[in-house]
Image (cartoon, grey):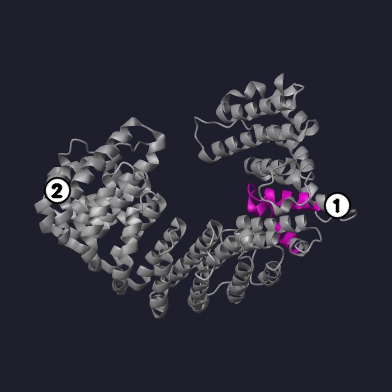
Amino acid sequence: RQSGKASEIRIRVASFECLHEIAALYYAKLVPYMTEIYNITVKAVREDQEDVGLQALEFWSTIAEEEYDRLTEEDPDLPSHNFIKAAAPHLVPDLLKLLTKQEEGQEQDDTTWNISIAAGTCLGLAARVVQNDIVPMVMPFIQENISKNTTPEDWRLREAATFAFGLILDGPEPKLFIDTIKQALGYLLQAIKDPHPYVKDTTAWTIGRIFEFLHDNTIEPSLITRETLPPIMAVLLEALKDESHIAYRICCAISQLAMGFQDHQGSTSPMSPFFKDSIAALLQCAQRHANYEHSKVQISAFEAINDLVRSASRDTLDVVAQLIMVVLPEIDKTFQLPATSAEAREKQAEVQGQLCGVLQVIVQKLSEEDDTKAGVLPYADQIMEKVLHIFNNRSATVHEEAMLAVGAFSYALGKQFTKYLPAFFPYLRVGLTNYQEWQVCLSTVGVLGDICRNVEEGILPHCDEVMSILITNLGREDVHRTIKPQILSSFGDIALVIGDKFDKYLEAVLRVLKQAMALSIQSAQTGDADYMDYNNQLRHGILDAYSGIIQGMGPAKCSQYLRTEVPDVIQFVASIGAEVTPTQEPDEDVAKASVNLLGDICSCMQDMSSALKLAPNKAWEALVSYCSQNENVQADTEWACQQIEHAVRS
């Protein structure tokens, strides 16, 4: 308290820094002190220098984040003291005043941090906690100032009001002000032409926020309809031609608009008439911002294209297919970029990665239906030629994006992808052995699984080398742990497609799986909450591996090689089931994989009744019960539950 009043500014700053650290670490202990804390923080915000005020605001932002977490987690052991709800009627007016303290030109720099941005951050966090009650606190300020244009300095009021409007969209129930939003959207579309660049920038951001939080099939009445969309699209596509910072916001808004149609039912959508022109405008925007300084705009344009393609309805899939021949020449252009400096090479890699991402999304979209999947085939040779060329670039980012594109491409082609395996395999090998860049290695292992499922026995000529690399990676301590569960899953993918030919790898794989089960059980017993997410990944990998091996090897080989493994597997599943309590459910995916594995065992091997009944730990029953009653996994585990029940009764 006393240091907050110290004569030296650095001491006052440090004291408030300590205060928001205390708020983060000791929230539950703050109750007796909150009245005084409110007084000294508000005094600092109103009267002290900006550096001190920033730290005082940070205290309230920290409290809002903590209370939002407690609100969403609904943990009875972590109650909220509702400090933000109590303070909001007094704090919000100060925050709204601070929104008008903008710096000229700050719209050009996303890294700017000043009192107006800090106040906006605090207001947005408070809105998530206060929810519906924030609307009457803020709407009068918005209505009074959003169109004010009496003096040259009134841009500050217009920007602050627009900013406040965008900030409070995440929190209140949409139905509370959907009618207000409909009216405001028309005004905002006009305000995108405001003479002040900062107002234009914030307006574009707010439009994107409206699409993000209020444009959804679940919200009635719909905000965006066939009638309201034409003027919206006209304004957005025109605004893409504006200055770079405006174009960036508009790209983000188009992304949010497209995502709102992603679950639209039917063969067409309100977006269909604008699909082709939107793609063309975004491509032009990306090309116009191809220089290094504006790479953020180019990336956001490509991401908007991806979201448009993901949400494309059936009547626009012909345009999606045509996009392939737009993207491939763009990839060609990247090889002509001068890569004489590290910066230039980074830019080349960035653009290639983005284009690979677009290609991946296009192929995935066309692969959703069998008849449109065939639309990829005419371009197959050209696609693979470009992607293999990109693999020659040593950039990790490009390698990862190109690898993911190959995974999608292999699904579209199915067994026909086998013809490309000889040319592609050297790059697959590079990715699998590149564990230093662990995200590249992780993506490559995932794509290996995709390719196995798609080419089936076509992977056989490469299996010896692939299995050798994977088993070596599992044994290395310097391989990132996130990769290892994915490797275990890939064993299941390989076994499933090569069948009983997997027996040559069985001894090594079973040894590894036994070690992984022991590690998982030991880790669970420590009760380390931070390790639980990883342990669930590890469990999933183990379960996938056993399921793939059992299904692939078939009854005869399973009885010959795997019967002695069954008790350990049942005990492993039981160790997962032992964690289920009336108040703690298992991870859905792990529970589903566990029960399906037991179903595979009971289906593939005879006389499993005694193995299940005589297991020292019968907690596997808790997982079967959970899956048979949980609607989310019921359908996916029905067959397995029947197989287990039949085995137990026989």
Q: Between residues 32 and 47, which one lies in front from this camera angle?
A: 47
**Label 1: few (<14), some or many (≥20) within 10 Å?**
some
**Label 2: few (<14), some or many (≥20) within 10 Å?**
many
Segment colored magenta: 158-186
Asked if the magenta segment contains residue 166, the reply would be yes
Residue 470 pos. (x, y %): 27, 52
Q: Between residues 575 and 497, which one lies in front from this camera angle?
A: 497
Snapshot quadrant of residue 584: top left
Foreground: disc 2 or disc 1: 1
Residue extending farthest right:
150
Residue extending farthest top:
2
| Label at residue 374 | none
- The answer to whether one can see residue 552 in this image is yes
| Label at residue 608 | 2
- The answer to whether one can see residue 591 in this image is no
Which quadrant of the rendered structure holds the N terminus?
top right
Q: Which residue is mark 1?
A: 154
Rounded to the nearest angstrom, the CA distance separating label 2 from label 1 is 79 Å
Q: Secondary structure at mark 2?
A: loop
Q: Between residues 261 and 252, which one lies in front from this camera angle?
A: 252
Residue 89 pos. (x, y %): 74, 36
Q: Secondary structure at mark 1?
A: helix
**Image height check: is 24 above or below 329?**
above
Residue extending farthest bottom:
378
Q: Between residues 94 and 340, which one lies in front from this camera angle?
A: 340
- The residue positioned 17% from the left and 54% from the top of the image is 505
**Image height check: is 250 above or below 541?**
below
Amino acid on which the number 1 mark rests in the picture: Asp
Amino acid on which the number 2 mark rests in the picture: Met
Most frequent secondary structure within the magenta stretch: helix
